[in-house]
Amino acid sequence: MSFWRAIAVGALVAAAPALLAGEIPSDARRSGYAFMGPDTRAMQDDDTANPGMLFVLDGEALWTKKTGSAEKACADCHGDARSSMKGVAARYPAFDKALARPFTLDQRINLCRANHQRAAPLPYESRDLLALSAFVAHQSRGVAITAGDDPELKPFVAQGRDLFMQREGQLNLACTNCHDDNFDKRLAGAPITQAQPTGYPLYRLEWQTLGSLERRLRSCMSGVRAQAYDYGAPELVALELYLMSRARGLPMETPAVRP
Amino acid sequence: MAALINVPAKARRGDIIEIRTLTSHIMETGFRHTADGALVPRDIITSFTCRYNGAEIFRADLFPAIAANPYLSFFTVAKESGKFEFAWIGDNGYTSTASAPITVE
């Protein structure tokens, strides 16, 4: 009997590292910035060369523009974004008590438009929505990410983690297979990063525009030939929440530039 | 449209200064099609000029292969205090202007 028990214990010990793989220790977490070449870094660092700043400028103009049937601007309630919005994006997606689920910064902006400005929601990935969320998130540049700290978010973080670990698509790959197990290596010449969402919405040179984390997640999903979730789907929000909680402590970079 | 201009606020007479400009534009090539096969019409910036106190010091022609939100950087000699004026002209009657002051000592 003890022989079989020894084999069972041995098998468990051998399986343990595989079970634990997937969590990057907090001191080893690195932003996508650390994986880029010097040219792209220089573009992000210089606010007059970073194309994401064009959207931040647009967002600043929208912040003070009255809209909707309530004839209210964001600034009429929130005042100067430099103080009122500082650190806000670092804790999104956040839990909404009324809806009893987490929602993203983009969804929060549209909730505000519906409830307070009485304006039509901005479509996902539209220029105005990206500009507003870039402007708001830009106020948190340098602030450490704290998303997912709310205890009510726990089941949603767990759901996001499950989705991150779950294989999907014709290529049968999970997010973790690249971003936990194989970062620092290359995929078709491009560096594989740790998937730390520190700079969203960010300017991707490939897109030639600003894009949200949801757009990024959806393009990874089509990359593994899976059916991507729709914009705003609870699964995407949960994934976004898990990724932000996984990046806990890293500083925000919005608007980041990525290749 | 939004533009970001980087001109040194101060320079010494005779200094070579770098001017950097970034402007917002989709630069649609005119070669792409929508999912249902319709051609997306060309919409690009075709010309950029920079004037220094009224005199043209730099001009560039832009073409469909240039990326969205064109970034241009060039050099000039700081001669006198005054103003740099920038103009972008493009398809469908697009025009955009910006300016930046400089103090030359």
Image: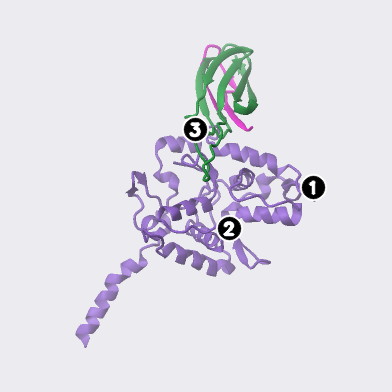
Residue A172 position, x and y percent, is 37, 61
**Letter of the green chain:** B
- Amino acid type, label 3: Ala
**Looking at the image, is mark 2 or mark 1 nearer the viewer?**
2
Q: Nearer the viewer, residue A191 or A16?
A: A191
Residue furthest out toward the left: A3
Quickly name the residue at label 2: A232
- Amino acid type, label 1: Glu
Q: Residue A24: in sight, yes or no? A: no
The Cα–Cα distance between marks 2 and 1, rounded to whole angstroms, is 27 Å
- Mark 1 element type: loop
Residue A152 position, x and y percent, is 59, 69
**Looking at the image, is mark 1 or mark 3 nearer the viewer?**
3
Q: How is the image coloured?
A: by chain
**Letter of the purple chain:** A
Quickly name the residue at label 3: B67
Range of magenta residues: B1-21
Residue B74 position, x and y percent, is 50, 21
Residue B10 position, x and y percent, is 59, 20
Residue B86 higher or lower than A131, as above or below: above
Residue A71, numbered label = 1
Q: Earlier in the sequence, mark 2 or mark 1?
A: 1
Quarter where residue A80 is shown: top right
Residue in the picture at 34% in, 46% down: A188
Residue in the picture at 68% in, 56% down: A111
* Left or right: residue A190 compared with residue A41: left
Q: Residue B100: in sight, yes or no? A: yes
Mark 1: few, some, or many residues within 10 Å (few <14, many ≥20)? few
Residue furthest out toward the bottom: A1
Mark 2: few, some, or many residues within 10 Å (few <14, many ≥20)? some
- Amino acid type, label 2: Gly
